Structures are given as structure tokens and as C-alpha cells.
Amino acid sequence: MASDKREKDEGKEEAPKKSKKKLFIIIGAVVVLLIVAGGAFFMLKGGKKAAEGEGEEATDESTESSGEKGGEGKEGGKGSLSGSIVPLDTFIVNLQVKGSFLKTTIQLEFGEPGQPHTLEADMPKVRDAIIRIMSGKTAQDILSVEGKEKLREEVKDGVNNAMGSEDVVNVYFTEFIVQ
């Protein structure tokens, strides 16, 4: 009887030891997994920052070598540092020829870093100016490279007029579909 009681007591003591072992193994595995995941995250994020840093250095060097002469400085020419780029919503516009549509997404580049404080307030005027310019075109007007360049300049001038400033230095079409 006494030996049976000892065996039961030993069995009780071993059961908690086994559950503690399992608990430590599980916690250890979770910690190792978190360390590996954290290391991978920082390595990948660090690689992106290094690549961005190299790109910024290249931009700085090209700006210094060009000296920002010949009107290429602030006008968004080659070798200039860009200001902030603000994406606009997608535009779907009827063109002059019945049944023709233009779907485009535009991004505006501003000369100064940071978004102008008036952009939010002027957004209805900006969108209206862009829609008026685009709806006055035919598919033939904007399908050629020269036509797109002319449209880009007209949009830049129209947005600057709508905002009452010369903040926009370049216009980028990130989507351009004519149907």
C-alpha cells in the first residue's frame, strides 16, 4: 500500500514536469520563430533602404554634375531633384468623337517637397480643369507621342491656372487608355 501510494505520488510529480517541459519547448520554439522572422524583416527592410540610399546618392551626383544650368533645374528637367508627387484619382472622360473614351490616372509633381496646402481646397478646380482639357480632345489628338506631350503641357498649365500658382512642374500619366 505504501509503495502504491509512492508510485501515485511519483506519477503526479512527473506529470507536471512533462507539461512544463512541453511548455518550455513551445515557448522556445515561438521565441526562435520570432527571432528568425524579425531578422528576416530587418534584413529585407534594410536592403530596401540601402537601395533607396544608393538611388538618392546617384540623383545628388547627377544634379551636381549638371549644375542645374540651361533651364533644367526647377522645371523638372533631367538631373533635377524632384519635389513631391501627388497621385490624383482616375479620370474617365468622353472624348469629342461620339463613343470615344479616355481613362487616365495622373500624378502631379510639385517643385517644392511637400504637398501645397491649397491643393486639397483647390482639388475640385483642378479636377474640373483636367476634365475640360481632356474632353476637348479627339482620340487622334492624344494617341501619338507628340499628342500626349502636348496634353501633358496643357494639363500642367490648366492645373497651375486653377490653383493660381506655378507649383506644378510636371505631369505624369500612369495609366492611359483610349477606347
Image: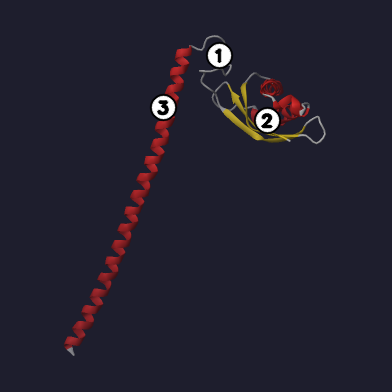
- Calculate the distance from the C-alpha at mark 3 to the C-alpha at mark 2: 36 Å
Label 2 Cα neighbours within 10 Å, binned few <14 / some 14-19 / many ≥20: few
Give the residue at x 59% y 25%. 109
Q: Is residue 152 positioned above or below 14 on the image? A: above
Of the two numbered discs 2 and 1 on the same chain, state the one appearing first in sequence: 1
- Residue 31, image x and y in percent? 33, 54
Q: Amino acid at mark 3?
A: Glu
Q: Mark 3 highlights which residue? A: 54
Q: Is residue 116 visible?
A: no
- Residue 1, image x and y in percent? 18, 90
Are circles 2 and 1 on residues that touch, CB within 8 Å? no
Q: How is the image coloured?
A: secondary structure
Q: Residue furthest left?
A: 3
Label 1 Cα neighbours within 10 Å, binned few <14 / some 14-19 / many ≥20: some
Quarter containing the C terminus: top right
Label 3 Cα neighbours within 10 Å, binned few <14 / some 14-19 / many ≥20: few
Q: Would you say 153 lies left or right of 71 here?
A: right
Of the two numbered discs 3 and 1 on the same chain, state the one appearing first in sequence: 3
Q: Mark 1 highlights which residue? A: 72
Q: Residue furthest right?
A: 98
Mark whose residue sits in front, 2 or 1:
1
Q: Mark 2 highlights which residue? A: 121
Q: Amino acid at mark 2?
A: Ala
**Which quadrant holds residue 65?**
top left
- Residue 118, image x and y in percent? 65, 27
**Which quadrant holds residue 171?**
top right
Q: Residue furthest top?
A: 70
Q: Is residue 165 visible?
A: yes
Q: Amino acid at mark 1?
A: Glu
- Calculate the distance from the C-alpha at mark 3 to the C-alpha at mark 1: 23 Å
